[in-house]
Image: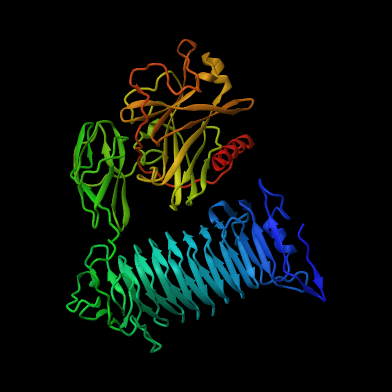
């Protein structure tokens, strides 16, 4: 147990440890308990694990209830293995009202993220998902953090230095400076937000060396605010939206021409690089006769804002692609032939998902034949060295015996059908869960409804992807996307989709498994043995056996787990004694239309992401599975 030594009324800084899982015995099992025990200057070292709590660090009152200059950091230094998740979603995960506080090396999920009021300190090396950083009347350094879904807000006469942060997929502003606050933004990457940077309500910012791309609007500046903005890379749908100033203070968009490597590799510093996704931005098309990397003419952003030294280097990073497509026909009868036309911009490679479980295509303008009735969601993934972009059109193709082939878009069907292309009347139950996909974490979607025999979907995340949904359609009969029933005696048919088209690939996830249950009463009723249970996946026109193992049981159910190379239609089956197979074997008995070859991943779009809740046994099984994967 850590000790606090007192000498002449002065506390000697100490280190407390926190661990709520396997590993060394620590001083505390919760971060809040360690904070409550800490005094001025202490360090709290948190071992890897998941901590569900809201931590308050305050300096109200007198000793021993007074704490400042406190450092809270992960023992590993890796935010992927030390997670703090909000217990109360209405409160911040970390609430700071103190001075000299450092929070370092955590994944912070939910609540309001990290909230600072009348404080100063440092936030660094954290991943913050579904909860932003809120700096109120404080002085703070925010360094090397990753922000997902909600950005960074500095307001109410605050001072913030924001450096080397990645801010993406945030609604409204990725970084907001407001209400008489001042922000210094250096070397940040701000992308795929509604608005990259917001400066408003009598605020100002020094904005240098940032990459601001893929946003709907790069930067907005209110008429009572201003910025000093130079050597940034802008590539957005609209780069700047600036109100007419009414305080007589104008933003500046360049510094004096100075020798030095600029953000796009040119030999001089000056203004900013102005691009757009179409490749027609001012810097992309401007001339540079003397080859100094500065455009020959200034860039007039609007009547009151001019970049006098816009950068003009042609060999800049590729623009982010913009995916788009159309089709010559969107409705018709089975055997409907559709000619797709690519309308994407800045793409060097394409991947089409036609939504019917067929192999994907890399052709630019493919022709595809839809043989079965249903509504099909089509997705196009356009990529280049500058990144990728996915355009998904839900229920874009309608195939029906009653339809006649016409042009134009189809309308969405009601109920549980649609996004997968499954026939509405064949869906008995639909279950959707949503999770945050964070690079390096083990992701688990847990399902606990008794109508759904699928208990969990687990995999390792290989990149940050924001909120992603898994959809399970429990079917009344075999999927409308398959030609024949699975072999053996079928316990249940399902469609399983993880994320939108293009997500569940080896570039984004690893080691996906499906956990499911089978009722013991069903085994008795059908005269089959538990050792014959197997999970089959339909892909490339045939049913494929998946390696299946038993992982547990209770009074009503036996629980199994199977590895899968992708997501599409599935069936849980059993075999009678004379054709029984062991669930430990990798091959089923010979069946017509059954292939032992591992199949390629195909899936259409689905929406949403799950939170974990189920019976205690399921939680134990999921926990054991994740622990074994983590140890391996």
Task: Classify residue 102 by image quadrant.
Answer: bottom right
Rendered location of residue 28, percent (x, y): 72, 55
Judge whether 286 appears above or below 512 on screen: below
Q: Residue at x 33, y 44 (%)?
A: 412
Residue ID at (38%, 38%): 417
Please give left or right for residue 384 compared with residue 76 in the image: left
Viewer-side residue, 272 vs 335: 272
| Depth check, front residue: 319 or 327 | 319
Image point (34%, 35%), residue name: 600
Taking 68 as reference, is 387 left or right?
left
Is residue 79 placed above or below 58 in the rendered structure?
above
Q: Find residue 157 and report its horizontal and vertical position in percent.
A: 54, 80
The residue closer to the viewer here, 620 or 217, is: 620
Asked which colour scheme the image uses, the reply is: rainbow
The answer to whether residue 91 of the structure is visible from this angle is no
Q: Position of residue 16 (x, y in %)?
A: 71, 60
Single out the residue that lies furthest toward the bottom: 248
Q: How many marks?
A: 0
Q: Position of residue 394 (x, y in %)?
A: 33, 45
Which quarter of the rendering shows the C terminus?
Answer: top right
The answer to whether 104 is drawn above or below residue 405 in the figure is below
Q: On the picture, is 322 further left or further right than 178? A: left
Report the residue that reaches farthest toward the right. 8
Which residue is at a point 80% across and 68% down the rendered structure image?
A: 5
Residue 422 visible to an observer of this rendering: yes
- Quarter of the picture holding the N terminus: bottom right
Quarter of the figure with residue 538: top left
């Amino acid at each position: 147990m850590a000790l606090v030594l007192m000498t002449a009324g002065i506390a000697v800084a100490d280190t407390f440890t926190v661990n709520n899982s396997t590993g060394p015995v620590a001083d505390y099992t919760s971060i809040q308990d360690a904070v409550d025990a800490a005094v001025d200057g202490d360090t709290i070292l948190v071992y890897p694990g998941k901590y569900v709590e809201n931590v308050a660090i305050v300096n109200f009152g007198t000793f021993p209830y007074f704490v400042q200059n406190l450092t809270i950091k992960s023992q590993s230094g890796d935010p992927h293995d030390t997670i703090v998740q909000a217990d109360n979603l209405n409160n911040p995960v970390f609430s700071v009202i103190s001075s000299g506080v450092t929070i370092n090396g955590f994944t912070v999920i939910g609540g309001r993220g990290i909230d600072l009021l009348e404080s100063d300190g440092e936030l660094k090396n954290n991943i913050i998902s579904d909860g932003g950083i809120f700096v109120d009347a404080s002085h703070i350094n925010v360094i090397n953090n990753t922000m997902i879904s909600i950005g960074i807000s500095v307001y109410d006469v605050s001072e913030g230095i924001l450096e080397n942060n990645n801010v993406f997929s945030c609604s409204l502003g990725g970084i907001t400076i407001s209400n008489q606050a001042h922000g210094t933004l250096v070397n940040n990457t701000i992308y795929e937000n509604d608005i990259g940077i917001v400066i408003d309500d009598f605020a100002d910012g020094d904005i240098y060396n940032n990459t601001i791309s893929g946003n709907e609007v790069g930067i907005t500046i209110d008429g009572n605010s201003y910025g000093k903005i130079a050597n940034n890379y802008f590539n957005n749908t609209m780069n700047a939206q600036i109100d007419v100033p009414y305080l007589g203070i104008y933003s500046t968009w360049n510094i004096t021409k100075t020798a030095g490597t600029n953000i796009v590799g040119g030999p001089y510093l000056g203004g900013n690089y102005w691009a757009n996704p179409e490749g027609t931005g001012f810097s992309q098309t401007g001339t540079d006769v003397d080859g100094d990397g500065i455009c020959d003419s200034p860039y007039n952003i609007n009547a009151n804002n001019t970049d006098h030294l816009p950068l003009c280097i042609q060999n800049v990073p590729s623009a982010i692609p913009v995916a788009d497509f159309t089709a010559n026909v969107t409705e018709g009868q089975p055997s409907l032939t559709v000619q797709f036309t690519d309308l994407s911009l800045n793409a060097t490679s394409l991947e089409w998902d036609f939504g019917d479980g067929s192999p994907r295509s890399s052709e630019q303008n493919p022709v595809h034949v839809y043989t079965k009735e249903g509504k099909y969601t089509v997705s196009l993934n356009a990529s280049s060295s500058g990144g990728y972009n996915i355009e998904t059109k839900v229920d874009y193709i309608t195939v029906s015996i009653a339809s006649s082939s016409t042009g134009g878009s189809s309308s969405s069907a009601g109920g549980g059908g649609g996004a997968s292309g499954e026939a509405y009347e064949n869906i008995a139950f639909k279950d959707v869960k949503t999770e945050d996909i964070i690079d390096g974490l083990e992701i688990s979607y847990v399902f606990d409804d008794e109508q759904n025999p699928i208990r969990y979907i687990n995999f390792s995340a290989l990149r940050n992807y924001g909120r992603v949904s898994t959809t399970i359609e429990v079917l009344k009969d075999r999927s409308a996307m398959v030609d024949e029933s699975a072999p053996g005696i079928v316990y249940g048919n399902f469609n399983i989709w993880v994320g939108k088209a293009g997500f569940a690939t080896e570039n984004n996830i690893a080691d996906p498994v499906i956990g499911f249950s089978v009722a013991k009463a069903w085994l008795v009723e059908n005269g089959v043995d538990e050792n014959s249970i197997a999970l089959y996946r339909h892909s490339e026109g045939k049913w494929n056996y998946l390696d299946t193992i038993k992982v547990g049981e209770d009074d009503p159910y036996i629980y199994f787990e199977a590895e899968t190379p992708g997501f599409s239609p599935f069936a849980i089956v059993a075999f009678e004694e004379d054709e029984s197979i062991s669930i430990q074997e990798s091959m089923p008995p010979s069946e017509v239309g059954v292939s032992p070859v591992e199949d390629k991943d195909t899936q259409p779009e689905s929406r949403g992401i799950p939170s974990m809740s189920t019976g205690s046994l399921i939680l134990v099984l999921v926990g054991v599975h994740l622990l074994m994967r983590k140890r391996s």
